[in-house]
Amino acid sequence: MTPPIVVHPPSQSGGRRVTAHTESLGTAHRPEDVVEFLRRAGLEPSEIQLDDPNLIEWRGGGPDVWE
């Protein structure tokens, strides 16, 4: 099963695109941005675990890779 959230590899211009089931949530520049996008999508911040592979697929590096 593919996680519903994908954080794409860092772009040349900076930031990482974040999608939910192919819908763009925005471009994150730090882990807190990912949490905010998910909060806006209806998830409770206390339930968001950035290292949960069932929730988020990190492409091109995990939550510590932004460049």
Image: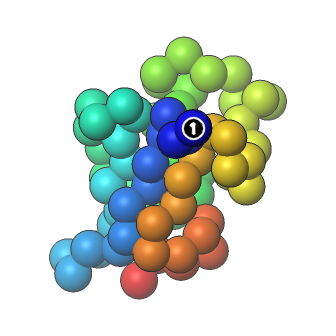
Instruction: Check the image and name the residue furthest to the right.
Output: 46
Q: Alpha-carbon neighbours of circle 1 within 10 Å: few (<14), some, or many (≥20)? A: few
Residue at 63 percent of width and 39 percent of height:
55
Estimate the x, y position of residue 39 in percent, counting from the top left.
56, 27
- Residue 15 is left or right of residue 43, and the answer is left
Camera-side residue: 57 or 40? 57
| Quadrant location, the N terminus | top right
- Residue 46 is left or right of residue 8, and the answer is right
Q: Secondary structure at mark 1?
A: loop
Residue at 37 percent of width and 31 percent of height:
21
Observer able to see residue 33:
no
Observer able to see residue 60:
yes
Estimate the x, y position of residue 43 in percent, counting from the top left.
62, 21
Q: Which residue is mark 1?
A: 1
- Residue 22 is left or right of residue 45, and the answer is left
- Image position of 15 with respect to 31: above or below: below
| Quadrant location, the C terminus | bottom left
- Image position of 54 with respect to 39: above or below: below
- Residue 47 is left or right of residue 14, and the answer is right
Estimate the x, y position of residue 50 in percent, counting from the top left.
68, 51
